[in-house]
Amino acid sequence: MRIMGIDPGLSHTGWAVIESLRGRTARLVASGDVPTEPRVPLPERLASLFRAMDGVFREYRPDQAGVEAQMYTTASGSNVPAYLATGVVYLLCGLHGVPLSEFSPKSVKSAVAGFGSADKSQMRRMVQVHLSLSEPIRSEHANDAVAIALCCFHSAAGLERLCARAASPRGG
């Protein structure tokens, strides 16, 4: 199974594709970062993000996707660009028929680092350890996307085990 993790943002959208191997083991297939130019009008930036991410979906054909949940607030409009980028991600998942799960930042950190208040350097190191990478992922946005993909992977693996236990003759 291929899982895509996406860290949506208007300035930079990180993405990563991992593939499950055996049980709770995964390998990194590819990762990247889609930047958009701040001086370009918003509709063009969203179109650019859409085209780039559409290419990623077409090339890697994920079976499932995970995205970091946006913290919806009414206090300011500062998150609007991230919401718009997230909308592009939702649209692409819908167009490509890819089921999408949302994960809170705390749940991503818990799944990857073991505790919900891990900092960026701890997350970078744990992503490296989980995937047995010789060096850390350079892009902060791509690293966040890998962490989201790993959270989605562990969530899906846990659900499969739960369903298998429920389906067993003894029920668990």
Image (tube, rainbow, N blue to C red):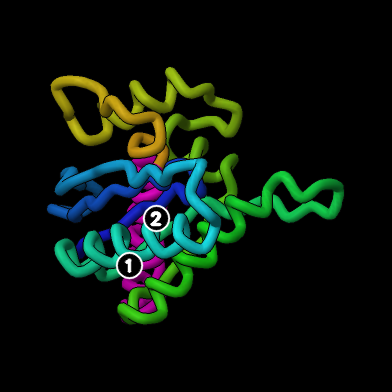
Q: Does the CB distance between marks 2 and 1 fall below 8 Å? A: yes
Image coords of residue 108 (percent x, y): 49, 43
Along the line of sight, the residue nearer the viewer: 159 or 29 = 29
- 118 drawn magenta: no
Give the answer, above or below, for where 167 lies relative to 64: below
Residue at (40, 52) in percent of width and height: 6
Image coords of residue 166 (percent x, y): 40, 76
Taking 4 as reference, is 101 left or right?
right
Taking 101 as reference, is 65 left or right?
left
Rendered image quadrant of residue 28: top left
Along the line of sight, the residue nearer the viewer: 20 or 101 = 101
Q: Residues within 10 Å of mark 1 (few under 14, many from 20)?
A: many
Residue at (32, 72) in percent of width and height: 164
Image coords of residue 38 (percent x, y): 50, 41
The disc at residue 152 is 2
Identity of the amino acid at label 1? Gln
Q: In which quarter of the image is the N terminus?
A: bottom left
Residue at (43, 69) in percent of width and height: 100
Residue at (17, 28) in percent of width and height: 133
Identity of the amino acid at label 2? Cys
Taking 134 as reference, is 85 left or right?
right
Along the line of sight, the residue nearer the viewer: 148 or 132 = 148
Q: Give the range drawn in magenta.
A: 145-172
- 153 drawn magenta: yes
Taking 22 as reference, is 94 left or right?
right
> What is the C-alpha distance between the residues marked 2 and 1?
8 Å
The residue pinned by badge 1 equals 64
- Residue at disc 1, secondary structure: strand
Rendered image quadrant of residue 169: bottom left
- Residue at disc 2, secondary structure: helix
Q: Quadrant of the C terminus?
A: bottom left
